[in-house]
Image (cartoon, grey):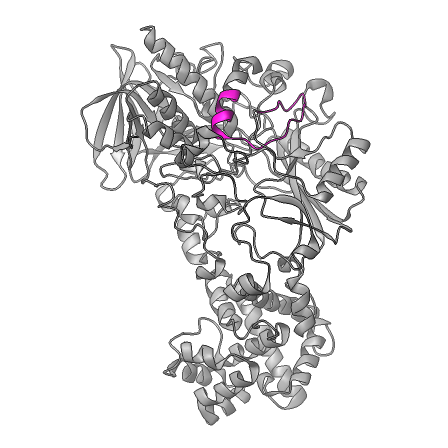
Amino acid sequence: MKNYKAASMDRRSLLKGLGLVLGAHAANTLVSGNGLSVAMAFQQTPEGNRQLQLLTASQLQTLAVIGDLSIPKTDTPGALATDCHWFVDNQLHHCFEPQEQETVVAILDKIQAASVARFGNGFSQTEPARQLSLLNALEQTQQEFSLTDTQAFKLVKSLLVFGYFTSEVGMTKVLAYDPVPGGFKGSVPYASVGKAYSGGFPF
Amino acid sequence: MQDKKIVQNTDEEFDVLVVGSGITGGWAAKEFCEAGLKVLMIERGRLVEHRKDYPTEGKGPWEYPYRTRTDNLLTEQQQSVQQQCYAFNDTTRHFFGNDRDLPYTTEKGTEFSWIRANQLGGKSLLWARQSYRFSDFDFSANARDGHGIDWPIRYKDLAPWYDYVERFAGIAAGQDKLPQLPDSISQPAFELTKPELDFKASLAETFPDRPLVAGRCAHLTQPGKIHMELGRVTCQARNECYRGCSFGAYFSTQSATLPAAARTGNLHIAPNSVVHSLVYDDAKQRVTAVRVIDNDDLSEREYRGKLVFLCASTLGSTQVLLNSVSKTFPDGLANSSGVLGRYLMDHNYNAWASARIPGYEDEYYKGRRPTGFYIPNSHFEPSRYHKDYIRGYALAGGATRGNWQGMSSSDGFGEDFKQRLTQAGPWQVWMGAQGEMLPRADNQVSLHPTKKDKWGIPQLHFNCKWSDNELTMMQYAAEDAANLLKTAGFEDINAQATQSPPGLAIHEVGTARMGVDPKQSILNKYNQSHDVANLFVTDGASFCSSGVVNPSLTFMALTARAAHYAIEELKAGRL
């Protein structure tokens, strides 16, 4: 777990790390979309004592890239470094209905299939500019994507965003963290805070 | 200073047996202990020690496996009813009951959501802390429009006791001078935000009968000596109250009444003691003991006492009375009138409205306010009733700025998207209705003829539903709330009347009502049983009507008043 986390600090090393962890054969399998064998390989790696709950390794990769494109590393860590893709897999398994789980799985598979059809490569093996053009088409309900797909993608994105802004980094470094405000003032200049507070009940 | 004494098996006869440890049980115990009486507080659940047993307090969401959400399967199997409560999540679930152990049945075609908090402190740990006095309009409503029976008390009877409990509890509130909402002895109110202040000013101009005030809540904003000597300090505006508060800033049994009772040396507590019934002596015409089943090993024991204060929550107290049968009272103790279990009420939360408030981009606030604003009932007397329904509702809400949660599925990628989500969003306002429910004999709890819980106690059977009056009121409340927001110039207005069953306001009251006439009521004007002199019921079961405001402050005042009446009666040798 620790090794995987270290290897996933940014996008490039994540993808590189994937090759290291899975080996060239598995990486090729991933490109060809054979999720099951990749998932098996993924789970058997000595570095990873975490188990995927719902997604295949291929779907997790697609999710990781979506997270990275949505919330990149800036002066603060992004979705990759905060393991939002792993969070989504776990959260879906424990806190969501089967229908919602299927919706997420289906749209991740559709993104993968669309990438293969458009670019001849799996989504995570594709150039970032092409990945972005594909996700923009999805968000705007264009080309091969239906309104149902766009709605499904909103769920994926909201889960990644939830994972990010409820992470320790998201709450304490990215947003204005004020665990013990000391009292309530009804009016302060927004500029004196400069960003949104991270919490309310329950967070 | 002395501490509470924990009791399990004892032959001792206590001066007072207090059943329950929530808001009313805590008050009863405090008043009797301070009067020098030896008190046994009987609690069905485990001990919860102030500060020590608030395991989730101050934890960030990242410290929870599902970031404060709960596991579906676990919730479905153990807390499917409890999870309907707005305060239920992974940070609070340990203060809610386990539905597997707390079964109840509902009449076909009806539903009731019974929220349970069975531990020392009860629902005082989980309450929303909103605190308002009933007015004379509330106490006289039944008499004036003919629904239910008249309350045997008026505002002047309770006013000094509101003063009394408010000084001790600490109520943050304004002095608003409204006839339908008498002012409290208050600590400084929580401030309104700038858009709320402007909304208030706009309402004053366009709807003079719809004043907007700061939501009154049981939080310390300027603690005095009586609070600080119990270890209570100023509210820090964390708004994580439902997890327990080590600052003791909000009123709970643990923060306030329990330490006050314990320091007298007179407080004894019997935890894990599920009350099965009260033992009635037909010859002496008195309750002599409380029969309990051990929460853990299901063994049976009794506690003896001279006086019993039943403070087990509205439905808990009524269940105990219904299950206490004797030769004199075959249909439940103190039930010569036959109305025990009837006239169950809750508040109706089934209407809301929301809007976006344009502008105020330079405005923000500091802290997380544990209350909001409050627009009291404008239909507070028959001449002001709406033509299509009787009684009325209040609107409670707040205006705050959105955050990433409102933008989490919005379009865009990369640095711009990330940056946008870190900024405060537009101002949003939300208001929910809290409507009065009429007292109706058909809305009843009874004991199930065959089904029992694991302690061998017959399950409660609910037959309770909203009447057309309540349903119609909520339709109008949603329209009204939307209209107030629209007239104020707000945008993107949404409003809805919803269909949740009774129970979820967690303001259940009635079922052992007070009254002047022993043939129509269980309790007299001092919450004392008409039939059994040494038995008092001071929780919500005693209510004759639900009123419009949140009931807990009235629970406190009724309990303190009843306790002092009982103390005087004891001194005079009449009890």
Residue B323, image x and y in percent? 33, 26
Q: Can you say whether B412 is above or below B376 in the image?
A: below
Q: Closer to the camera, B466 or B228?
A: B228
For the point 31% across and 40% down, the residue is B46
Q: Quick check: B291 left or right of B432?
A: left
Which quadrant of the view contains residue B295? top left
Residue B81, image x and y in percent? 46, 45
Say if the magenta span includes residue B77: no
For the magenta stretch, what is the residue range? B162-184
Farthest front residue in view: B225
Q: Can you say whether B443 is above or below B356 in the image?
A: above
* The N terminus of chain A sits in image quarter: bottom left
Say if the magenta span includes residue B176: yes
For the point 41% across and 76% down, the residue is A2
Q: Closer to the camera, B386 or A99?
A: B386
Give the total number of marks visible in the rendering: 0
Residue B260, image x and y in percent? 37, 29
Q: Can you say whether B543 is above or below B406 in the image?
A: above
Q: Can you say whether B120 is above or below B185 in the image?
A: below
For the point 53% across and 13% down, the residue is B157
Q: Determine if residue B509 is in view.
A: yes
Q: Quick check: B329 left or right of A11?
A: left
Q: Closer to the camera, B555 or A108?
A: B555
Residue A3, image x and y in percent? 42, 80
Q: Determine if residue B413 is in view.
A: no
For the point 53% across and 47% down, the residue is B238
Q: Main secondary structure of the magenta part?
A: loop
Which quadrant of the view contains residue B305? top left
